Amino acid sequence: MMNHFKNKDGKVIVENLIKTIQENKDYLSKIDGEIGDGDHGINMNKGFTMCKERIEGKPLNLTDSLKALAMVLMMEIGGSMGPLYGTMFFEMSKATEGKEEIDRQVFTEMLQNSVKGIQSLGDAKVGDKTLMDTLIPAAGAFITGKESGFAAAIDEMIEAAEKGRDSTIDLVAKIGRASRLGERSRGVLDAGATSCFLLLETMGKTIKELLSEGQPA
């Protein structure tokens, strides 16, 4: 297993993120419908599909692909998640800017930047039943585990992201539309935490594939 992959080979990460959202759009809207507007999957699918049309057939690297996704989400889809995920992917793209190789240090910066970027938009923290319940522990687990290698740290990140997502079942929403429901928001997954898990899982698995493809014979 290599300890880095090439920025120029990273477009596939964004292509796989798009596929994941397209495949899970109904599931995400169903979860969102329990305590929210029920449009999370619809909005996400709209943005990610628009990005697919923008990047298809173009020789883009990871930086450019993440930036294209960020711009569509920030500028062209409604709801609260567009700006949040747009910021997340824009901050990730900034961490890769000018880097020929993406190693565990660059990926650490991608995760740290995305947490800081989203925190700059609001004060969501772990326990508020938002995507931060997935993202913050996932980033922390990767950083803690990175000494054991890029691929091993990704496994830690995915496991922490899954636990973070599942933790939202027992939480009462403190932020957003669902917070109006108070105790009634307990007992269901948060849609943002769920989509964040799917995105981090897909990103992690695709990076592991790129690391193994780069392995010398």
Image (cartoon, rainbow, N blue to C red):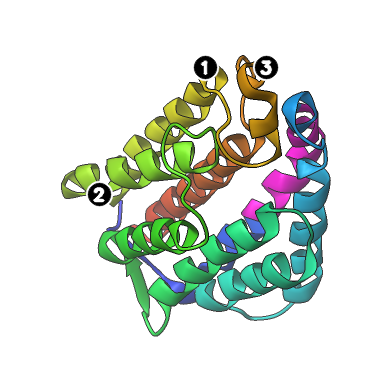
Task: Point out the frontmost of discs 2 and 3.
Answer: 3
Q: Which residues are drawn in magenta?
A: 17-30
Residue at point 50% right, 46% down?
200
| N-term mark: 1 or 3 | 1
In this rendered view, identify the residue nearer to me: 145 or 167: 167
In the image, residue 189 sits, relative to residue 110, either above or below, namely: above
Residue at point 53% right, 70% down?
90
User: What's under tag 1, amino acid-wise?
Assistant: Asp
Per the model, the C-alpha gap separating discs 1 and 3 is 11 Å
User: Which residue is tagged 1?
Assistant: 170
Residue 186, picture quadrant: top right
Task: Report helix, strand or loop for mark 3.
Answer: helix
Residue 30, picture quadrant: top right
| N-term mark: 2 or 1 | 2
Quadrant where the C terminus is found in the figure = bottom left
The disc label shown at residue 184, or none: 3
| N-term mark: 2 or 3 | 2
Question: Where is residue 124 drawn, in percent x and y?
Answer: 48, 46
User: What's under tag 3, amino acid-wise?
Assistant: Arg
The disc label shown at residue 143, or none: 2
Q: Are marks 2 and 3 in contact (CB under 8 Å)?
A: no
User: What's under tag 2, amino acid-wise?
Assistant: Ile
Per the model, the C-alpha gap separating discs 2 and 1 is 26 Å
In the image, residue 155 sits, relative to residue 189, either above or below, namely: below
The crowding category of the residue bearing disc 3, from other C-alpha atoms within 10 Å (few below 14, some 14 to 19, many at least 20), is some
